[in-house]
Image (cartoon, helix red, strand yellow):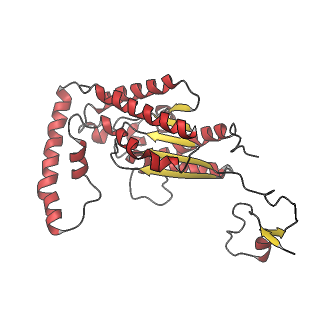
Amino acid sequence: MPFVLVPAPVGSVLAASLSDSSIQSCIRPYTPGGDIMAEALPLPIRILVKGASTVGTASPMGGPRTDFTFPRAIEASLLAAGRPVEVRTISVASERTKDTLRHWEREMVGYSPDVVVLVYGHYETIHLMLPWWLERHANSLRSRPGRIRERYRKVLLRPFWMSLAKLQAKLDTTLDPNIRKSRPLRVAADLEKLIGRIRFMHSPLVFVFELQPPAKRFRSWFPGMTARMAVMNKTIAGMVERQDSPDIRYFRTTELIAEHAGGDLDLATPDGFHYTPEMHRVIGTELATAIMEWADTQEHLKHG
């Protein structure tokens, strides 16, 4: 009698040792005209998370593998609830909002995500005047080894960058921190354009993050960043509100920090910018709950 291979329950063949019974559970006799897909697994929820280092970095760095950032925490929460899920994360240090418009097609079109999480606008609030290209050159994690290269970075580049950063910090206490008034407007416009394009292609659920100002460690370096962040958040939130769509949501993080860290940014982001693994889990769990509720309204993702 011919046999066909059919999907087994998740994890049934991933035990420490494969027994004959576990293998047999994946095989059953083929009956002509029968429905061989009667036990097919449900489609996974496809989730794409994009942003700068706040997406892919936990504070402090160098912890164990269980120190998940929130995209992995989303995955863990959904799997724990019995929901199949596939999460892709694209996290690029210091990525500007406008840069994501240049590569969104190769990241999203073929993947066709059900949910898109966007964490942008943070970098644009950091520096009052220093250019992005110089900051990336001075703080690059891609520099190559070599005696001359390393000496150049240590003796010339790093001291030059630190001098400019100190000058900027002084100016940030005397000038209007929001003197570049068009910056948050451009960020919101870029996000709106990106959301419009991905919604036109795939109609996913979209989350846009509320951003957090620096904790104590970086306040002296970026005195005006808190004020710039407030304007950036207000502008992005206004953009989301104008879309007037239940599938385009502004994800507020301040309430979660208040509830789980007593509103203390030094506890929630001890290195100044990045969430602790505990806050990442809180954020990921909150997002997973919202995603499950939305998925239950989608025919291709309904559970049970």
Q: Position of residue 214 (x, y in %)?
A: 33, 37
| Residue 32 seen by the camera | yes
Residue at point 40% right, 29% down?
A: 233
Residue nearest the viewer, comparing 158 with 236: 236
Q: Quadrant of the N terminus?
A: bottom right
Residue 117 % position (x, y) = 50, 41
Q: Is residue 274 visible?
A: no
Q: Is residue 87 above or below residue 240?
A: below
Relative horizontal placement of residue 294, taking residue 51 as reference (left or right) = right
Relative height, residue 70 to residue 151 (above, below): above
Position of residue 219 measured from the top left corner of the image (x, y, whole percent): 28, 36
Q: Residue furthest front?
A: 33
Q: Which residue is found at the position 30% from the left and 30% from the top? A: 183
**226 relative to 261 in the view: left or right:** left
Residue 125, located in which quarter of the rendered image? top left
The foreground one among 30 and 231 is 30
Residue under the image location 69 percent in, 39 percent down? 296
Q: Nearer the viewer, residue 197 or 86?
A: 197
The residue shown at (54%, 23%) is 244
**Residue 237: x, y in percent?**
45, 27
Picture mark count? 0
